[in-house]
Amino acid sequence: MKKFAFKVLAKDNFARSGLIETHRGNINTPAFMPVGTQATVKACTISDIKKTGSEIILSNTYHLMIRPGVDRVKNAGGLHKFMNCDLPILTDSGGFQVMSLSKLNKIDREKGAIFNSHVDGKKFRLSPEESIKIQLGLDSDIVMIMDECPKKSNDYNLIKDSMNLSLYWAKRSKKAFGKNPHKALFGIVQGGLFKDLRLESLNSLVEIGFDGYALGGLAVGETQKEMFQVLDDVKSNLPELKPRYLMGVGTPSDILGAVKRGIDMFDCVLPTRSGRTGLAFTWNGRVNVKNKKYQNDNSPLDKDCDNLELNKYSLNYLNHLFNTNEILASMILTLHNINFYQELMRSIRSNIQKGTFDKFHDKYVDKL
């Protein structure tokens, strides 16, 4: 079985084009991972996802442990068989959802996160060891360590304590993961908006040793400028020969700016969530297809879209579908948005390889 591996193929300043190798297939980077929270990318089939050029998807430990439960997935042969997906799958650890979804939660240094399900109030305990056990039970290809994801705060001591707890849990996650050469375990850099804490977290994680490094604790209410500053603070210290993942990000503009600062992997619910509400991402900017001005517009949603199958549907028709609450509306626009994100990633990779990424970035960063 092929071992997990990563190599950098081209660089343009800090922007990198690379290749992640897994036993389930290769992933060209920079890569965008469509989010399949509950073992499904909402409103899309896996075959449709693959047609967009997506090479990896993300699923969610927290949601799957609550419904349907890891044992049910294991009995089905693992997450890939359960959801009929032969692409690599990354699972997050559940730390972010414990913070964002559970109104009743308690963080214990030894026991982990003790919380009540947002579905039925049932009590759960998610320790670093349990999170890794669940992810291995799901047969995830890229496993994330258990961390504490604090809300945005200017309280230095609070963020420092949280970072130290995440480092303690990182060591326990590494031990629980054991030896799985065909899988990868990623560390998660915490430290809020404080440069010294981010660097301390990163350097400590590198000392522990992981297959990749993620930037967590962002996309929690900070401005884009603040997020980019965090990336600028750490970009020169991130290991050169390991993939770098910015968790939960983001808009096309966010992605362009993060690639410029050396990031290789992204995930976000934005393209799918926006698709379900009538907002499309196009090469000419965002389009609200529910707008009345499109009622007699028979042009395609995005004339520059390279997926001609999607361009068979006019703005007029999409406007009609959304304003009559037809399910097909969400399906078409969700797939369009994922396709656009993958077109963006392909263009990013191509421009890095040609040494023209800065020009591409400057052309589109304010437009998209």
Image: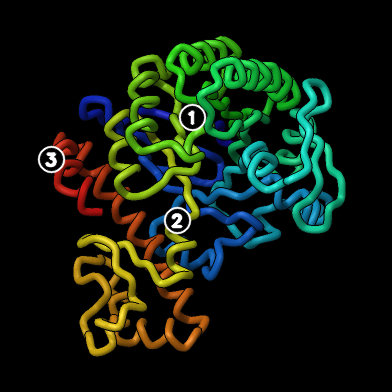
Residue at the spot 62% in from the left edge and 43% down from the top edge: 91
Q: In this picture, is 167 found above or below 91?
A: above
Q: Secondary structure at mark 2?
A: helix
The amino acid on which the numbered mark 2 sits, given as a three-letter code, is: Leu
Q: Looking at the image, tell me whether mark 1 or mark 2 is earlier in sequence order.
A: 1
Question: Is residue 102 shown left or right of residue 196?
Answer: right
Residue holding disc 1 = 215
The amino acid on which the numbered mark 1 sits, given as a three-letter code, is: Leu
Where does the image place residue 74, in percent across and percent down from the top left? 79, 51
The amino acid on which the numbered mark 3 sits, given as a three-letter code, is: Lys
Q: Is residue 294 visible?
A: yes
Where does the image place residue 149, in percent across and percent down from the top left? 61, 32
Residue holding disc 3 = 359
Q: Is residue 76 visible?
A: no
Q: From the viewer's perspective, is the residue at label 3 or at label 2 nearer? A: 2
Residue holding disc 2 = 270
Residues under labels 1 and 2: Cα distance?
18 Å
